[in-house]
Amino acid sequence: MTARPQIRCAIYTRKSTDDGLEQGFNSLDAQYEACAAYIASQRHEGWRLLPARYDDGGLSGGTLDRPALQQLLCDVDAGRIGMVVVYKIDRLTRSLADFAKLVERLDAANCSFVSVTQAFNTSSSMGRLTLNVLLSFAQFEREVTAERIRDKIAASKKKGLWMGGTVPLGYDPHPDPLQRSLVPNPEEAVVVQTLFALYENCSSLVDLEATAKAQGLVSKRRVSADGTVKGGQPLSRGQLHYLLNNPIYRGQIRHKAELHPGQHPAIIDEALWNRVQVKLQQASQRSRQGAADPAVADLSGVPPAALTGLLRDETGDRLTPSHTRRKGRLFRYYISNRLVSGGTDPTGWRLPATALEKAVLGIILGHLETAAQTHAILAAPDATTAAQVSKALLALVSTLRTEGTAALSTLLSSGHVAPPNLHLQLAAPFLAQSMGVDPQDLAPTFLNICAPFQLRHRGVETRIAAGQMSPRPDPTLLRILAQAHLWMDRLRAGTTLAEVARDAGHSEAYIRTRAPLAFLAPSIQSAILAGTQPPDLTLARIVRTGVPLDWDAQAQLFGFV
């Protein structure tokens, strides 16, 4: 009698909240035991439980971005799992679209899916139909629940209730946990009042940042449940802008674009608040005008440098704006500061400003779009607000595309050019305010970007390849490559080099140094045609180095290895 084939089974468990997970026997354990018992009952069918556990505690089913689930899918793709067992289908996902992706991925790996409390599995068409129906109701329930929670939050904020989040500087939570309100912290309230008063006498937020640091004014000190201490650091320009715009200090609660009277007392009087808001608005208008009209910002006609003070090179040296004029044309650069203060330095960067600004903006906008589409914005994603936050972020991206590189000064906190990567730190207060969330709720992976960044030449202008670059054929290289084939065809047919040069209108040396492009490896020529060659592979480089006859040597020489 032929033995039944073994079916390797993996159990996946999930719980949406952290409540009860600290107990010795929690919901995840209960789900696991039920699934293990079901697998044991199918031992006669060849089912065998794998020892690895895949548990996601405190994570919503509205997204597939869950550590244990991703590890499970990786093991499925590797062929280690033949059956995924869950307690209920909504433990795996509550999204019909996500479920379709999961089933497609499981099918590709010849892996089935079964729910122990719902008598069906994906190995039959009827089981798939039943799953689709159940998932439709699960998704409907999740969306209705999210709407209900959003309505409750909106109604609570209209009543002036504090609905949680990071407590702002100047306040503490009400000592009565049943009172959803804030109470002023006397010492911190003085700090907030001082900052508002200082801004009236400062020329800009940069000036306020320096003044606040000199006076020892710091952010709110927070102690987490595990004893970790955060905050208590000098306030950044972004944090100051967020603080000065926060209506909580006027005794108001913000809900999206609406303001409601709060149940907590104000710590900034109305007159001071209004004066600060007018000054902030005027400063914002000056910034936009300067970005739209370069002459406003610089009487010499040089456009403002959007990345001023934001980027450093791999040595930690700040990249400083610079410019020159040649034949009436303006050329802008970002150069390592040591080139300004210390003269020549072969390790210093001199980068074309326009190309660098566009590359940085493109990287950031691409990162924001991806984060919005994958709901990778908040440190603790919440199904009730994920769609709303993602929608707000996509709307911000659309606005930023309209503003162009002028938006970089408010969007970026700092950056570090360290080829082969570019590291960027986004301005948390600006992004948080745009999405209606607290800066502390943003995920670190959302605020930090590491993108491919190639810079080839130092001390002179350089070509920049940053992020996911779209193919861009080099027209000069394409033209000479085509001509090289024509010249070589004529030379093979017996035409002399002098005749080929005369007909082409070039010198013999010109033809002799460029005709060898016809001997480039087919893969290299295909890359040139598609525009996917390394960014530093230019005609000048090929002419300077020559073309080896060995194709492997060409790949090594021209950066295809």
Image (spheres, helix red, strand yellow):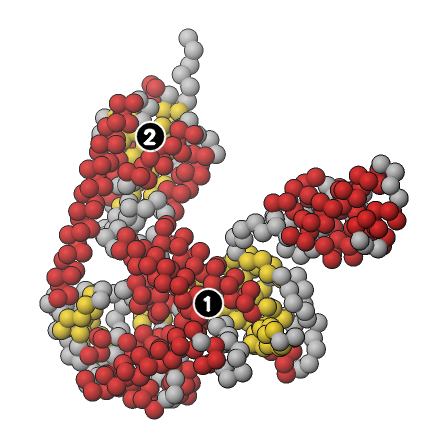
Q: Is residue 413 above or below residue 532?
A: below
Q: Compare residues 533 and 38 and report the one nearer the observer.
A: 533
Residue at 28% across, 41% down:
95
Sequence order check: which comes first, mark 2 or mark 1?
A: 2
Please indicate, yes or no, whether residue 464 appears anywhere in the rendered image. yes
- On the picture, is 101 further left or further right than 494? left
Q: Which residue is mark 2?
A: 113
Q: Residue at x 36, y 47 (%)?
A: 66
x, y (%) of residue 394? Answer: 34, 57
Q: Residue at x 32, y 46 (%)?
A: 63
Q: Is residue 535 above or below residue 113?
A: below
Q: Amino acid at mark 1?
A: Thr
The quadrant in which residue 100 appears is: top left
Neighbor class of circle 2 (other Cα within 10 Å; few <14, some 14-19, many 20+) is many
Query: Would residue 445 be seen by someone viewing this image from the given angle?
Result: no
* Image quadrant assignment for residue 252: bottom left
Q: Is residue 549 left or right of residue 243?
A: right
Which quadrant holds the N terminus? top left
Compared across the picture, whether 211 is left or right of 341 comes to left
**How many numbered circles does the render carry?**
2
Residue 451 at what x, y percent from top left?
52, 57
- Which residue is identified by label 1? 405
Marks 2 and 1, how far apart at CA: 49 Å
Comparing labels 2 and 1, the label whose residue is closer to the camera: 1
Q: Is residue 24 above or below residue 39?
A: below
User: Which mark, by number, is residue 148?
Assistant: none
Most foreground residue, 263 or 479: 479
Question: Which residue shows up at 26% across the image and 48% down it?
Answer: 16
**Residue 44: x %, y % from top left:** 33, 18
Whole-percent x, y for residue 87 in the image: 26, 35
In-front residue for pair 547/125 = 547
